[in-house]
Image: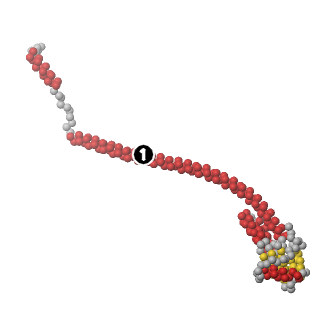
Amino acid sequence: MMILKGTQKLVLAGFLVLMLHTPVPAQTDVRPQAVMEDHEKGMEAEARTQKAREAWARERRDLLARLESLEEENRRLERDRDRLSRSRDHLERDVAAIERELMEAKRLEEELDGRLDEVLLRLGESMASDIPFLEDERNQRLSMLHDLMVDPDAGLAERLRRIMEALRIEADYGFTVELRRIPLALDGNEVLAQVLRLGRLGLFYRTGDGRVGFYDAGQKRWQPLDASWDAAFVRAFDVATRKRAPELVTLPVGRILP
């Protein structure tokens, strides 16, 4: 057994301490090409990551802008919906009012149609009791009105217009003066005479041989007058044809019917 001396022990201890404090060389890769490739791959990965971040950022901005646009569009559509809802309510009220007016118009149309029948009947009765003038023309107009009332293609407005027109014409007859040469049945003979109509007041005749007379509405026949009326008839006929200035002329009218 080796027994170390004191000096040898100190040297051995120092050597051990030196061994403990001396760093052991690291096992490094001495391949620089592999290191560069790893570095480049890292850089490419970082670039791809950066591009992906930028693409996502752009997409996020686009999506946010699209979302804002859609929200604005949604607000506009809601406003339009509210406006259309109010318009619909207004239109529904208008439609209801129009339907009521149509029902009322239909009722009035039926009522007016009945009234027109009554008016036409009274017009015919008035013409039958009137003094006889323009009989062919007036009877033809009355007949056309009767045909119009039963014509399915004639509307109420047209029937009303035509009847009102006939009433106006009949009313105008009361304010006109007319002198015509027509044949009259006098004393059983047909004689050509001048007949003066003064509105609806009366009819007066004068023949070529100087006979004068008037239409008696009460008795519904022509009444002769004596020769003393001839001068008055001549003046009246001349005033009617404007051969002389208007003047007051006395003429017989017979019995005035109510």
Q: Amino acid at mark 1?
A: Leu
Helix, strand, or loop for circle 1? helix
The image quarter containing residue 249 is bottom right
Colouring of the image: secondary structure
Q: Quadrant of the C terminus?
A: bottom right
**Residue ID at (77%, 82%):** 244
In-front residue for pair 69/9: 69
**Front in this rendered view, residue 99 or 234:** 234
* Relative vertical location of residue 95 with respect to residue 223 in this rendering, above or below: above
Q: What residue occupies the far bottom of the structure in this picture?
A: 209
| Count of numbered circles in the view | 1
Task: Check the image and report above or below for 150 versus 19.
Answer: below
Residue 176: x %, y % from top left:
77, 74
Residue 235 place in picture, x, y as percent: 81, 81
Give residue 238's quadrant in the image: bottom right
From this viewpoint, is residue 248 visible?
yes
Disc 1: CA contacts within 10 A as few (<14), some (14-19) or many (>=20): few
What quarter of the picture does the N terminus occupy?
top left
- In the figure, 227 relative to 169: above or below? below
Q: Is residue 8 left or right of residue 195?
A: left
What residue is rendered at 23% in x and 40% in y?
Answer: 35
Which x, y percent locates residue 40?
26, 43
Name the residue located 82 percent from the left edge and 70 percent from the top edge. 127
Q: Nearer the viewer, residue 91 or 32?
A: 91
Q: Position of residue 116 (x, y in %)?
A: 77, 63
Query: Pointer 1: what residue?
Result: 64
